[in-house]
Amino acid sequence: MMKILAKVLNAAVSLVLVLILASTAFLAISARTSPDGISTVAGYKLLNVVSGSMEPAIHTGDVILVRPLTPEDEIQEGDVITFRTLEDASMLITHRVIGVVNVNGEPTAYVTKGDANDSPDITPVTREQVLGLYHYRIPLFGYLGSFVRTKLGALLLIVLPGVILIGGEIRKMIRIMQEEEAAKTAAPPAD
């Protein structure tokens, strides 16, 4: 019974390590190959939340999934959008639309505000600045993403699982070779 339990536990640990390695590699490759440098999974952009401006709906340390804006999308009051700032196109902000500026009946800009902020953002956001619409959040996962980008995080979540997996496979090969050698020496000579 203990051998079966040990095998099941070993398989579970190996599976977790493989999943960690595979997901980390996938996200890194996704970010590197994406034109905007943002990891994309199933068509959604994955973004770390680094401020509390949208609390309580979205918390610091969350990862949010943002669906890229399509030409058919109509942005309305109440929608949460992620947009690039005019000052720095690499800076992304996720805030709620609290007003739509229309010219000749067509929306030309959006007034945004963080839920936790006292006042609206100073500059209205144009449609061209909008990266996408907020879809979902994964609580606290952003802390893990930030940790992986550190040297210690890379060591603990990439290198260490790889070494453990490789070491386990080497140990299995050595055990198999020892069992085969023991079987050869214990077998009676052939006539």
Image (cartoon, rainbow, N blue to C red):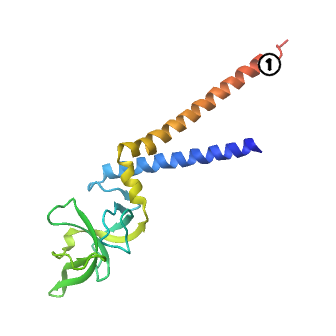
Up-down: is 94 above or below 164? below
Q: Is residue 75 left or right of residue 169?
A: left
- Amino acid type at mark 1: Ala
Q: Which residue is depicted at the point 30% across and 65% down? A: 51
The residue at the point 33 percent across, 63 percent down is 49
Residue 25 position (above or below residue 90): above
Residue at the (38%, 59%) spot, across then down: 142
- In the image, 169: left or right of 160? right
| Quadrant assignment, res 179 | top right
51 relative to 57, above or below: above
The residue lying furthest to the top in this view is: 191
* Left or right of 22 in this view: 92: left
Percent coordinates x, y for residue 34 in the rendering: 30, 53
Residue at x 41%, y 54% (from the top left corner): 144
Location of residue 73 by image quarter: bottom left
Residue at the extreme right: 191
Image location (x, y in percent) of residue 6: 69, 43
Quarter of the image where the N terminus is located: top right
Say which element carries label 1.
helix
In the rendered image, residue 101, in percent from the top left (x then y), is placed at 18, 83
Q: Quadrant of the C terminus?
A: top right
Residue occupying the far bottom of the picture: 105
The answer to whether 163 appears left or right of 99 in the picture is right
Q: What residue is disc 1 on? A: 186
Q: Which residue occupies the foreground of this view, 183 or 105? A: 183
Number of marks in the rendered image: 1
Q: Residues within 10 Å of mark 1 (few under 14, many from 20)?
A: few
Residue 119: x, y in percent? 22, 80
